[in-house]
Each structure stands twice: as structure tokens, then as C-alpha cells.
Amino acid sequence: MGVAAKRVISDLFWLILVSCIVLRAAGNFEGDALNAFKSNLADPNNALQSWDPTLVNPCTWSNITCDLDNSVTRIDLGNANLSGQLVPQLGHLTQLQYLELYSNNISGGIPDELGNLTNLVSMDLYLNSLTGPIPTTLGKLSKLRFMYGTCSSLLLSPLSLDAFQPSERRNSTIKSLASVTHDAKCFSMPSLGRLNNNSLTGTIPMSLTTISTLQVLLLSTSQ
């Protein structure tokens, strides 16, 4: 075998080795983030039993979905009888598209770091015990289409949509919102139509009359 051939083989070997190291590091990084979440939860039904931080990546864990690059894209833990709190480390899952945590007993606030989930399409926190304001950092989530947040005291917290730029909220479909401030900006969202079951209070703003495309607005279970 010539010198040139040996050099090519050597280069390929190192390329494969470096690629494996990078993939392992990325997988561990996401695994560490999920393990931090697990460590902050009570799990009486053992829904997280397969979450083993010693594995190369979390793609074989139950209720976790990954893409072809072994990046976490879904967390499906709805109705899992979990209690505890969300953790800032969840913001490290930058390829996450679906965060499904409905019907649990998760308490505390929503970490600002969830605003780093720029690929997030759906965030379902329905029927939990979350409190405090919805972070303005969520305004950076230009791909977010479904946000279910009718959950306990979170309903009473003000939500400002100042951070949502018009280009980012075009064709958005946010189905459940907390009490809203700066209504003129909020109600410029063309798909806003379902605000029922949110315990909203107060008068209906006159700015609603300026939405020429609005056909249906549901406000039941409000005051």
C-alpha cells in the first residue's frame, strides 16, 4: 500500500473518530438536560424509568423522539402523573419541536430559557399547577403555532406579546392564552379566535372591532 493510500485511510479514521466524539457529546448534552429535568420530578408511575444518562444519547428513552441526527425533537409526557418543576436546562434542547406535558402536577414558573427552543411548534402545559408570568422570551419562538396554557394560577398572570414581531406571528394559531396586556398588539394576530376556558375578566376591548379577518371569537368561561 502506497504512502498516499495510507494517508487517506488515516484521514478517514480520524474523521470518523471525531464525528463519533461530536455526536456522543451532543447526545450527552441533551441527555444531561433531560436528566436534570428527571431529577426535579417525582415519578410514581415510573414513566421515566428508561431515562439512563449513561447511554450515548437519549433517543432510546421512552417518551422521547429524535431526528436522524439523534437530536431530541419530541417530549411526550402528557398524563404521566409527574410532579415537580420545569428546569432551565430544557432550553438546551434546541431542536425540540413538541413539548407535551399536559395533565400532570408540574408547579412553579416557566423558565426564561424555554425561549431558546427556536424550533418549538407546540407547547402543551394544559392542566398543571404552573404559576407566575409567561416569559417574554417566548416571543422569540417564531415557529410556535400551538400553546396550551390554561393551567391554574398562570391564568391570572399578565402576558405581554410585545416580543412577538408581526412577521413572527403571521398565521400563528395560539389556542389558549392567559390574561392579556397591550391588547391592541395582541389582537392584531389574524388567527386569534379561541380564548375560552381562560377565566379572563374585564371588558371586551374596542380594538377587537378593527380585526377585519376575525370570524369567530370564543370567550366562554370568562367574566
Image (cartoon, grey):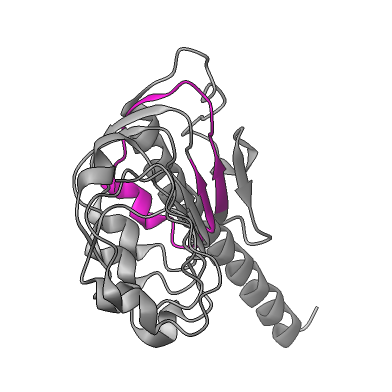
Residue drawn at (19%, 55%) of the image: 158
Residue drawn at (54%, 59%) of the image: 97
Residue drawn at (46%, 62%) of the image: 174
Mark count: 0
Tell me the quarter of the picture where residue 184 sits.
bottom left
Q: x%, y% of residue 216?
A: 54, 66
Q: x%, y% of residue 141?
A: 40, 69
Q: x%, y% of residue 140?
A: 34, 72
Horizontal side of 144 relative to 181 (left or right) equals right
Residue drawn at (43%, 74%) of the image: 142
Image position of 209 with respect to 42: above or below? below
Outermost residue toward the top in this view? 44
Judge whether residue 163 can be spotted in this image: no
Q: x%, y% of residue 47?
A: 54, 23
Judge whether residue 20 can be spotted in this image: yes
Q: Is 76 colored magenta in this rendering?
A: yes
Residue stretch in magenta = 73-100
Q: Nearer the viewer, residue 22 or 120?
A: 120
Q: Nearer the viewer, residue 162 or 111?
A: 162
Q: Is 141 colored magenta in this rendering?
A: no
Outermost residue toward the right in this view? 1
Image position of 94 with respect to 154: above or below? below
Q: Nearer the viewer, residue 195 or 53?
A: 195
Tell me the quarter of the picture where residue 35 sits.
top left
Quadrant holding the N terminus: bottom right
